[in-house]
Image: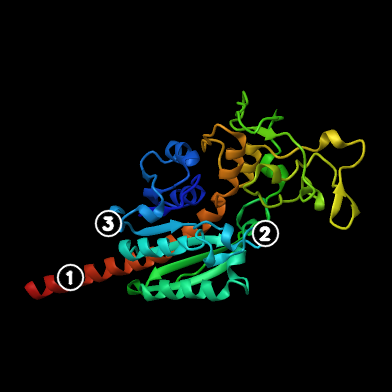
């Protein structure tokens, strides 16, 4: 089934859907620093580089599905938290505008957990109402990515709409088991290369994008422990390079006060940020998913903003199961109708 992908980023959502049998034919991404990455991994898709607000709906092709995660900073409790009052939060309405034109069999939208907080409840319910008014039966649910083969804490809200005329009920996927551990995710990787620069990328001779940012740690970063052990899943992979979790080789940080931690004295050399590739592994990108960037901070950003591939795959499988049921039912009806016509002719 063909997909239109909005706010595509590095393609985590697209890759999960392609693994489930879908194919992205049209994508939109406004950040020029991500264009090379998307094109390298989805050469068959048309990539529209304009801001979504500048794309006429008539330029978007027909497709069976529409997927995408409108920018989440406006809804994040750790970020601006301005919701629909922020221009980025209003991009949800651009998603709705494209949906109204394409009229796909289904849509899937992803956002941060803050979108369903009491602060934003009214705006979120208004968005859901608009989806319903366009002829979709809408479901939403909070997902913990670690329940779906993703080795990290990551809570996200998923909204799925199935066109009402298909007359099928959508069921979100059930958890698939305990979270993978950091050892399972990154334990086989060789030592990465340190990168003390915010600009130039350093190429690892064996593993692509296996470099980590060197530099100081802010008081905000040092306000809590940032080390998870080998037998645990990672903390959430964020979009900021300086906020990357620490590698599990280091001991847990020591509390020294209210919202204040330190590295264990004498062990300071063990503390380093996860590399870009380690973060990508934790986001369940395969190593052959090319990450093209000139500055290391852009590598961290595109990885941290992505939807984990494994979570996307399980969601896509559930969607395919649902719309596939409708497709098979229509096929059966056509065959039955054809048989009936043939019987009358005889």
The x and y percentages for residue 159 are 50, 66
Q: Which residue in the structure is indicated by mark 2?
A: 78
The part of the image, by quadrant, that contains residue 173 is bottom right
Q: Nearer the viewer, residue 29 or 279?
A: 29
Q: Describe residue 119's horizontal placement relative to residue 101 as left or right.
A: right
Q: Is residue 185 above or below residue 174?
A: above
Q: CA distance from mark 3 to mark 1?
A: 39 Å
> Observer-nearest residue: 70 or 233?
70
For label 3, the residue is 58
Q: Residue furthest top?
A: 205
> Mark number for residue 243?
none
Could you tell me if residue 346 is visible in this image? no
Q: Which residue is mark 1?
A: 339
**Res 34 seen here:** yes
Q: Residues within 10 Å of mark 3 (few under 14, many from 20)?
A: few
Q: How many marks are shown on the rendered structure?
A: 3
Element type at marker 1?
A: helix
């Amino acid at each position: 089934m063909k997909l239109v992908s909005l706010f595509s980023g590095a393609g985590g959502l697209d890759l999960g859907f392609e693994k489930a049998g879908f194919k992205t034919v049209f994508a939109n991404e406004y950040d020029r620093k991500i264009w090379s990455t998307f094109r390298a991994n989805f050469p068959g898709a048309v990539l529209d580089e304009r801001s979504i607000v500048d794309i006429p709906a008539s330029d978007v092709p027909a497709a069976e599905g529409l997927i995408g995660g409108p920018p989440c900073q406006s809804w994040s409790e750790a970020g601006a938290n301005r919701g629909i009052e922020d221009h980025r939060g209003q991009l949800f309405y651009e998603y709705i505008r494209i949906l109204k034109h394409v009229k796909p069999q289904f849509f899937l939208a992803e956002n941060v957990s803050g979108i369903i907080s009491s602060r934003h409840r009214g705006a979120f319910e208004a968005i859901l109402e608009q989806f319903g008014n366009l002829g979709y039966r809408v479901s939403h649910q909070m997902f913990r990515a670690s329940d779906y083969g993703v080795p990290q804490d990551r809570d996200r809200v998923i909204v799925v709409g199935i066109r009402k005329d298909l007359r099928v009920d959508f069921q979100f996927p059930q958890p698939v088991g305990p979270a993978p551990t950091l050892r399972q995710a990154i334990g086989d990787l060789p030592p990465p290369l340190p990168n003390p620069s915010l600009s130039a990328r350093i190429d690892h001779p064996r593993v692509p994008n296996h470099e980590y940012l060197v530099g100081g740690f802010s008081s905000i970063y040092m306000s809590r422990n940032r080390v998870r052990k080998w037998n645990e899943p990672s903390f959430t992979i964020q979009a900021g390079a300086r906020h990357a979790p620490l590698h599990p080789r280091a001991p847990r940080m020591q509390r020294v006060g209210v919202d204040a931690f330190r590295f264990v004295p004498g062990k300071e050399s063990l503390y380093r940020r996860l590399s870009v590739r380690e973060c990508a592994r934790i986001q369940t990108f395969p190593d052959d998913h090319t990450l093209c960037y000139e500055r290391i901070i852009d590598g961290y950003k595109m990885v941290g903003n992505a939807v984990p591939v494994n979570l996307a795959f399980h969601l896509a499988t559930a969607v395919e199961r649902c719309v596939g049921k409708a497709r098979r039912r229509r096929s059966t009806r056509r065959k039955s109708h054809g048989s009936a016509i043939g019987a009358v002719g005889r």
